[in-house]
Amino acid sequence: MNFVLIFLITIFSLSLFFYGRSKTKSISIEKNIKLKALPKFYGYYLVLWCSIPALVFLLVWSLFEPIIIKTIIIETAANQGAIFDDKNEANLIYEKIKAIHLGTYFGDIDSILKESALSYAKFINLFTNSKVVLIFGIIISSVIYALNKIKNNNKARDDVERILKGLLFVSSLIAILTTLGIIFSLLFESIKFFSVINVFDYLFGTNWSPQRAFVRDASSITAEEYEDLKDAFGFIPLIAGTSFIAFIAMLVAVPVGLFSGIYMAEYASSKVRKFSKPIIEILAGIPTVVYGFFAALTVGPFFRQFGESLGLTVSSESALAAGLIMGIMIIPYVSSLSDDVINSVPQSLRDGSYAVGATKSETIKQVVIPAALPGIIGSVLLAVSRAIGETMIVVMAAGLAANLTINPLESTTTITTQIVMILVGDQEFDSPKTQSAFALGLTLFIATLILNYIAQRAVKKYREKYD
Amino acid sequence: MNNIKIKSKNLNVYYGEKQALYDVNLDLNEKEVTALIGPSGCGKSTFIRCINRMNDVIDICKVTGNIEMDGIEINDKDLDVVSLRERVGMVFQKPNPFPKSIYDNVSYGPKIHGKGESKNELDEIVEHSLKKAALWEEVKDRLEEPGTSLSGGQQQRLCIARAISVNPEVILMDEPCSALDPIATAKIEELIDELKKTYTIVIVTHSMAQAVRVSQKTGFFHLGKLIEVGKTEKIFKNPDNKMTQDYITGRFG
């Protein structure tokens, strides 16, 4: 039903566009007056007036209809003598009633349920009919209003601009509110976690084993229980593992990415550049889970065999394999960004350097790179925040054990991997174990936020210099 | 009459399909200022960029013919471009100091060429070059500040100091005052007068008045051809060619 309505509204508004355009044209010819806006603006004006009020109404109606119907049905059922102790049972009965209405309920049907199902059908009908009537009423009144305005030769241009501005504003508002919502949900769950686990025990603990954290009742934890708990949520091994893998990844990505960026910007002919740049950027388009396969099934075992042939013990899931593959994944970020930055260093600087007799590599090393440095640092920092947020490759290739180690051949784990491990499967939402995922998320969010901020500052500083 | 420092014979330059210079024969005298004038796109800049082989930077550019400095062919594939540019400095249209300190801007060239091994020597070169570029008094107390923090005119003099720092014989100037205000321009012109005692200078300019003020010899280019060349006085008072006459009196260009 809703789709039919939306379709009808769209078709009607579009035809109004053509009507409004030709109508105002003919009015201006008939009465020999100069229009205050181009005829197409009157078309837009009609379209906007016809569609927006009706669509907004439809949206609001669809949001509230189920809630209202549900309240009414449950109330009538209760009046008829249905018994339910709490909200959950009421919900169950409501679902039963709905299922009877749709004909998908196969249990026993008593008289109360039957009655309720009938009244449910009645209400659904009533609501749908009144929805259609109201929407047509709204369309008709708003179109009449708009047509009147047009006949009086209003400043349709200004009105259209104002309405469009409003639409854009609403869109950005949605984006901002969503972000705030995410941050607050992280924050609230984290606060719950930190009300059980001391912040310092979390930040400076060296042991991470949340699976140990069985709590009978989260609201009253005895001092004895806490002694046990506080050792389970140590953040240090995770941040160490995360930084370690990110460090290995940067060891691969920064030199390779930067050098290929320099080659692309300074040495490659336009022909080579034209097809090699997209190829490098394909690396960024490979899904991370595919990198994960590659790391877990090819690179990991290769390192293990190679290590064993040298007499080393290498675990088949190693920080080295994960970091290496992650580095390869990040290469295009570094190379593409630094290529752009180097390209925007003005040619006049290079000319100045050549003119005193510097060679190409001297010029790049001593003039171009220093000039592009803030931008390059920015691109590297963006790559770092990408690396510490990466999950899939680590889940598949680096293992899950939270070892505090700096041996790249052992398995380690990262913040994101642990969040996945904690939230996979059935969870109690009030146990500190589940809530620790939110605390990890918040910590990670703050870390990447700081990195991104520094990166943007660096890039901005660079822009100011040469624009 | 001074000795001839640079001599071009039948010099042709092509940018891809397009020919930018046609058989240019031009002699530049030692320790003299030669001004090149002509409308935009006539090949003046292309000509001076042949002297220090800056056209090498442009992939599609091809140069044929001869251009000699002290009898040595410049347009020779085997010529060492680095040592050529050590002998032929260049100053560009827009001041282009490196994003480094004032000191590093000037010491860049000498370091590249392995001059000034000790810090003292380098200090001396920097001081000498800045003095020659008439900038020393203004910057001697802030050599560690970035070159980009100077005013436009000071930046251009810094670029001149940078060109002087490797002790060249020839300085090419490609419209060095076009981005500067009249006061800064006057300072640069004064400086050019001083520099010609030591260096051979070629200056491309759009300002006739500037050509008259600073140069001893003037060449007029039009559509890639050298139309007329001679003593500056003669070119501006009594040119042989009708086109030169029209250009300097402002009838076209």
Image: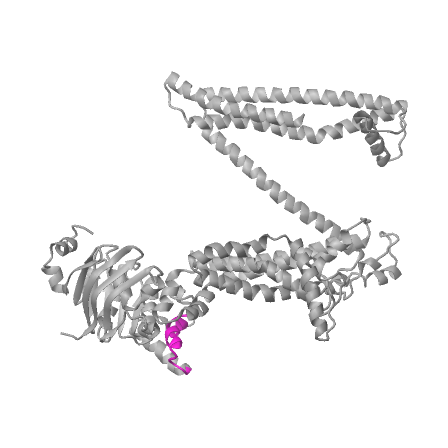
Extreme residue in the top direction: A30
Q: Nearer the viewer, residue A369 or A273?
A: A273
Q: Nearer the viewer, residue B10 or A51?
A: B10
Q: Quadrant of residue B1?
A: bottom left
Which residues, given as a range, are shown in magenta? B101-118
Residue A260 x %, y %: 51, 63
Residue at 78% of width from left, 52% of height from top?
Answer: A434
Is B129 on the left or on the right of B146, as rendered? left
Residue B82 is one of the magenta-drawn residues: no
* As drawn, A12 above or below A325: above
Residue at 49% of width from left, 28% of height from top?
Answer: A44
Q: Quadrant of residue B48?
A: bottom left
Is B54 on the left or on the right of A222, as rendered? left
Residue at 83% of width from left, 33% of height from top?
Answer: A91
Judge whether residue A39 can be spotted in this image: yes
Residue A130 x %, y %: 69, 20
* As drawn, A159 above or below B70: above
